Amino acid sequence: MPSPKLLRRRSSKRPFRVAILGQNGVGKSALTVRFLTRRFIGDYDPLLEKVYSCCKFVGGENVAIDLLDTAVQNENNRLLENIRWADAYILMYSVTDRCSFNECSRMKFLINAYRKRQRKIPDNESVASAFPVIMVGNQIDRDHDRMVTEQEGRKRANQLGCVAFYEISVRENADCVEKLFQDMYPLCKRSKKYWPVAEQSQTVYFAAGTQTKLETTEELERRKNMLYTTN
Ligand SMILES: Nc1nc2c(ncn2[C@@H]2O[C@H](COP(=O)(O)OP(=O)(O)OP(=O)(O)O)[C@@H](O)[C@H]2O)c(=O)[nH]1
């Protein structure tokens, strides 16, 4: 792999920010890397929390996207920091782990509570449409270990007010990951007024991060201006 070159973002407006939330081991890092590179990589450092920046052609337009691959979500403060940072959320669980499925409800509750507290949303608009959440059940290739049915997942996503629900296997199917993001952006565009859209950029940025954890939004902001590329 070529040594990473330090680049500066050309756009002055900020990208569309997506946080991938979910319990440990559900496949957040695998999803992120699949989307960015189409490759499936088996193992990742579970303690790392990274923002990956890219420009992708989604929903018929070039969109600058910052993807936050979150790490341990046990601390509510960290989770709230990530919620605050993002414009949209992917709530991920493993269909083989009911605990991770239930954790999605807690996270959605926190998203709603935080966004309502902000009072930025007019009364006639719901949190769901202003800050879209997509629920994703991963690891469907492990059918013999399945604990959560597709029907249950869909029902829960509906009850929680998620804008979409998918069952995927990051490991087996790169196309379903691509489709997830392709579908997601148009859904999220409805809430565009809540996030400034970035200018078009042709460079694919990748892997902004060091071995340290991200502690604050300020840290995330600082890193946004120091992006690395593999190209
Ligand atoms: N069988 C199968 N394994 C998967 C799939 N997606 C991810 N994995 C595996 O699940 C394990 C956890 O994946 P990660 O991407 O590290 O999960 P994570 O949610 O980022 O975990 P933390 O970093 O600990 O929060 C790894 O061993 C992956 O190879 C999938 O679709 N199918």
Image (cartoon, rainbow, N blue to C red):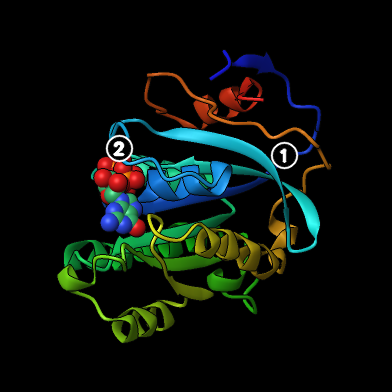
Q: Are marks 2 and 1 in contact (CB under 8 Å)?
A: no
The reply to whether residue 76 is visible in this rendering is no
Q: Quadrant of the C terminus?
A: top right
Who's the residue at 55% across and 50% down the image? 18
In the rendering, at what x and y percent does residue 85 appear?
Answer: 53, 43
Where is 33 relative to 148, above or below?
above
Mark 2 close to ligand 1, CB under 8 Å: yes
Of the pair 5 and 41, the residue shown nearer to us: 41
Q: Secondary structure at mark 2?
A: loop
CA–CA distance in space, label 2 to label 1: 30 Å
In the rendering, at what x and y percent does residue 209 appear?
Answer: 49, 24
Q: Seen in the image, is 52 located left or right of residue 102?
A: right
Give the labeled residue for mark 2. 43
Who's the residue at 33% across and 86% down the image? 151
What's the residue type where badge 2 is placed? Asp
Query: Which corner quadrant of the image does residue 37 belong to?
Result: top right
Give the labeled residue for mark 1. 14
Where is 222 relative to 22, above or below?
above
In the rendering, at what x and y percent does residue 218 appear?
Answer: 53, 27
What's the residue type where badge 1 is placed? Arg
Q: Seen in the image, is 31 located left or right of residue 224?
A: left
